[in-house]
Amino acid sequence: MCLTFSVRNVSHNYLNHTHTVSKERADKIAAAIEELHYIPNQMARTLRSRSSSSIGVILPNIQDNYYVQIFQAIESFFNAKGYCVNIGITKDMPELEQKYILDFLQKQTAGLILVTSQPDQTGFFQNHIIDNRIPFLHLDRKIMGIDAGFLGFDNRKTVCTMTDRRIKQGRRRIVLFAGLPEYSSESDAVSGYLEAFRLNGLEADRSNIIHTTPNKESAFRAAIQYFSVSHPEVIITTSKLLTVGVLEAAALSGLMIPENIEIAALGEDNWNRFSDFAGVRFTAREAILLGQEAAEQLYQQIKTPKLYEPKVQIFTDKGEESLPVSAISPHTGYSGPLTVLMLETLQVELFSGLLPHFKNRYHTDVQIHTIAHNQLLNAITDNKNNADVIMYDMPWLNSLARSGVLADISSNISSGGFDRDIYLQNCLERYGMADGKYFGLPFMYAPQILFYLRDLFEDRAVKNGFKKSYGVRLRPPRSWKEFNLIAEYFTRSQNPDSPTLYGTAVPAAYQECLVPEIYMRMRGYGSEIYNDQYKIVFNSHQTCRAYENLLELLSSSAPDYLTLNDRMAVDLFLDGTIAMLVTYPSFISNVNDIQKSCLAGKVGFADIPGKAPILGGWGLGISSRTKKFDAAFQFIHWACGEEIANYSTIMAGQSAIAKVFDNNELVSLYLWLPLYKETYALAEPVIPPSAHNREVIPQDKIDAVIAAPVYQMLNGKMNSEEAVIETCKNLIALFNQYGYHQK
C-alpha cells in the first residue's frame, strides 16, 4: 500500500470517533497506524493542562517479595504526594513490557519506574521515553546506552563475598542459580562468582553456573535436572523465586537443608526471619530503601525537570543471616531396587529427578531404563530388562493385558486406600482397564490440540491478504479442508508474502509419528477401520477424503517429513518456521518457550480441526513376572497420584489428576490447561479389536498395515485411492489371521 499521509495528519475524526469515516479511508488509516507504529498521544491532546496524577511502575512479578517491597515504598511515597500509582506486571516478557509502557504514555502518566525485561532495546527507550523527556528511572537491570537514572544492588560484590567465604571454608562444589544473563543484575552476580574463584587461585567450573528464566517453575526444572546428576555442597541463588524452586527440587530429591546442601540467597530485609525458608542463609537487600529513593528521584524529575541530573545509585546488601533449621533426618536404608521400563523422552528424564522423593518416603530404590518409542513395545514383550514396572502406550494395553505381560491390579484399586475419583472422569478405565479388570494407572495424559502463531493470525496485513486470496476470514481452522487452505497461505513457495516458510509439519520419521496424522484425519472425516461387529469398513468415501487431505497437505508442509519426528516438528513451530501444528503435550519439551509465547500472545491454541482428536497418553502397569508386586504398586500409585501431579505438569508430563486443571497458579502459567481438560470430552483413544472369545490384534500390527501404503503414497508410488484399497486388503488378511473372519 502507498501511504499518502503521515502521522501528523492521521484523521482526527477516525481517532476520536467524532464523525463518520468511510470504510475505505478507515482501512487506510488503520494500516498506516500499524505500519508507522503511531500512538495516540494524550499529552499532545491536552497541552493546556500538562499535569497528571498517575505514576506507572512496571515490574517483572509480584511473587518475589523483593519487588513487592520496592512497589510498596514507591506507592507509599506517591500516595502521600497525591498521586495514584498504577502497576504493570510483565512476567519477564518484552512484549508485555512494551505494551504497558505505551499504554502508560498514552494515558499521560507523569513518570515511569521500570525493572526491564528488554535491556538491549536501547532504541525503543530512547525513542519513546528519553527523546520525549518523560520522567523515568530504571531499577535492578540496566538498560544499555541510555542516559537515565538507575538504582540497584551491588550483586557482583555480594556474590563474590558469599562465594569467597565458602571457598575459604574448603567447599568447591558451589553452584550459582541465576536469572537470564542479559540482565545486568544476573551478569554481575556471575562476575562476582567467577571473581571469588580467581581471588583464591582457582578455576571456576562454568557448568556450575545455571541460568534460568527468573521464576520458581523454571528453577525447579533446572534444579531437578542438576540434582539427578550432581549433588553440590552449596547453592547460591540470586532471588527468592529461584530459591523456592531450588528448595522444592531439593526436597523431592531427598536433599536436606542444610545437612546435605547449603543454600545461600539474595533476599530482602524482613522482620519475620524465623518463619521463612528454614535452613536457608539470606543476605538482606533493603528493597524498601531502594524504592523510597527511586520515588524521591522520580518526584524531583517531575517537579524540577530542568534541574534534574540522572545518576547511578548502587546499594549494598547487609550480611548473611541463617534461618532456623527443620528437624527432619534423612532415611539411610533402602530396599529394592525396582526396575522401571519407560519411554525415552524429556518428561521421563525430568520425572527421574523426583525419584529421591519416592525413595526417601517409601525406602525403596528405583532404576529407570528408557527405550525409544519405536522400540519400546518389543522391549516390553521381551522383558530382557526384567522390569518390575512398565510404561505402556494406551493402544498397547489390551494386548499386553490379555497376553499376560501386565499383572492384574484390580484388588489394589478396590481397596479402601485407593481413591478412583481423583482422575478425570473415566480416565482410570480408559488408561488402565481391559476385559473388566485393571492393569495400570494413567501416568501421562496426552490430548491432541492445535497450536498456531497467534500474532500472525491477528496481524491486519496477513488477515487482509488471506481474505483477498480466499474470500474468507483467517481464523484457527475448524475443518481439515480449512487447515490445508491456511497451510497453503502460510507456505512461501505458494505465497511469496508468507511470513513463514511453511504452513505446518507432518512428522513421519517412523510409524508411531505417522499414524496419529492418519487417525485424526480419519476421525475428522467420519471414517473407521472396523465396525461394532469387527467387520472392516475402511474402504469408504470418508477414508479416501482423509487420505486426499493428507496428500494435498504435503505441498504446504516442511519438506523433510520422512525424517521429521514429533519433537522436531515442535521445534520448527517454536522457531517460527511453520505457522501451525497439531501435537500432543508430551512432545512439548520446550515448555518455557511455549509458556512465554502463549502469555505474550504470540502463540494461540484451539481444538484440532473437526473437534475429533485422538486421546493419547501413557499408563504405568506392573509386570506379571515381578517378585516385588507391593513395592511396584506403591511406585505406580505414587507416580500417577496427586502427590506429584503438579510437578509433572510443570515438567510437561501432563498429569491426569483432575485438580491440576483447576489449580489457578498453574492455569495462569500454562494457559492451555483448561483446553486440555475440555478436549478430554471430545477425544477418543485408538482401541484394537479385543472380542472376549478371540485374541487381541496388537495395535502395532494394525498401525504397520495402515502406515505401509501411506508411506508409498508419501513417496509418490501410490495415489490415495490405491493406498486405501491396499490397506483394506491387508487389514482383511490381518483380521482373518486373528480369528476376526471377514466375508
Image: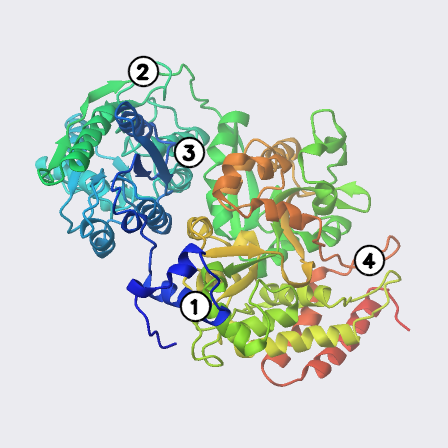
Residue type highlighted by circle 4: Glu
Crowding near pointer 3: few (<14 within 10 Å), some, many (20+)?
Answer: many
Callout 2 secondary element:
loop
Which residue corresponds to mark 4?
695
Question: Depth-wise, is mark 4 or mark 3 nearer the camera?
Answer: 3
In the rendered image, residue 374, in percent from the top left (x then y), is placed at: 58, 61
Q: Residue at x 48, y 68 (%)?
A: 22
Whole-percent x and y of residue 630? Answer: 65, 31
Q: Position of residue 81 (x, y in %)?
A: 25, 25
Label 4 to label 3, Cα distance in Å?
A: 46 Å
Write the residue at 88% across / 68% down. Answer: 741
Q: Quadrant of residue 310?
A: top left
Of residue 42 and residue 242, the one placed in the foreground of this image is 42
Return the residue nearer the eye: 584 or 451: 451
Foreground pick, 259 / 488: 488
Relative to 443, 177 lies left or right: left
Q: What number is the disc on residue 91?
A: none
Farthest right residue in view: 743
Can residue 711 be seen from the camera position used here? no
Q: Quadrant of residue 67?
A: top left
Read off the residue under disc 2: 273
Q: Nearer the viewer, mark 3 or mark 2?
A: 2
Which residue was labeled with disc 1? 577
Disc 3: which residue: 249
Q: Earlier in the sequence, mark 1 or mark 3?
A: 3
Tell me what residue is drawn at x 44 percent, y 23 percent: 332
* Amino acid type of the residue that numbered disc 2 sits on in the rendered structure: Arg
Q: Earlier in the sequence, mark 4 or mark 2?
A: 2
The alpha-carbon separation of the residues under discs 3 and 2 comes to 22 Å
Quarter of the figure that contains the C terminus: bottom right
> Can residue 408 be seen from the camera position used here?
yes
Secondary structure under badge 4? loop
